[in-house]
Amino acid sequence: MLSHLERFLSTVPLSAQPPGFTEFVIRAVEPAEAPLAEFDLRGLNFAPPDIVELAREHHSADVSYEISVRWDLWVSDMETAKWAKKPERLTLFCFGPEYDQGTYAESGHFLADVGFEHLFTGHAGLLPGRNAHPSRPEAQAEARFLLWMSQPENAREYHDKTRENIRKLMDWVREAEQALPIERTRLWSEGEENFEARLDEILAVR
């Protein structure tokens, strides 16, 4: 488990702005239990082997490891419609076989929360694809954003930046598949019926 954790962490595309790893939490039995240990990694410049050494102190079949990191994604400000590549939060989980009554059987031994889905699918159904249908704005900031996006050059840039985010995610998935004996991977979100198909759809449109 620990050797696989180290290899998994080694595949993460860390932010160019240190630190990459920011927090490490070890839990036992189930999520409702208080953490066994918490480590603030900011400013420590930890690498995967360093995190595994911390994990080794509390290693057992009924623990989970939660690692917070930063990775760089393109983000658009809805107020100004300006783009910037920013270090966004990425939360990684590693579940022991007995943790939370064997939750790994459903979620897998490794789980990654990659952040807000709009970083990969776009806001308000704007991005092209057969299932994309622009929605009505629900706030003034969103209305301004949709007006700005009505300009073809702005819509093109929005599509291009989001595609870069998708490619970064997909490249990471492929690297993890090559580094570990992964049986299967699954991409999903709460807002998309088929998240992976939606990403493929956005990538396919030129």
Image (spheres, helix red, strand yellow):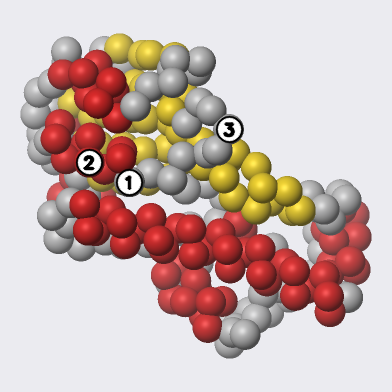
Name the residue tied to disc 2: 7
Identity of the amino acid at label 3?
Gln
Q: Say what secondary structure mark 1 lies in.
A: loop
Q: Nearer the viewer, residue 61 or 179?
A: 179
Give the amino acid type for the residue marked by disc 1 in the picture.
Answer: Thr
Give amino acid for label 2.
Answer: Arg
| Corner quadrant of residue 31 | top left
Q: Position of residue 101 (x, y in %)?
A: 14, 36
Residue 101 in view in this figure: no
Residue 63 placed where, x, y %?
18, 26
Q: Is there a contact, CB below 8 Å, between mark 2 and mark 1?
A: yes
Distance of label 2 from label 1 (alpha carbons) = 7 Å
Q: Residue at x 21, y 36 (%)?
A: 5
Q: Which mark is residue 111?
A: none
Check disc 3: other Cα within 10 Å, few if <14, some if 14-19, many if 20+: few
Closer-to-camera residue (19/169): 19
Residue at the spot of label 1: 11
On the image, numbered disc 3 is attached to which residue? 17
Left or right of 133? Residue 151 is: right
Identify the residue at image location x=59%, y=84%: 205
Position of 172 with respect to 127 (left or right) is left
> In the picture provided, is 197 more to the left or to the right than 124?
left
Q: Earlier in the sequence, mark 3 or mark 1?
A: 1
Q: CA distance from mark 2 to mark 3?
A: 22 Å
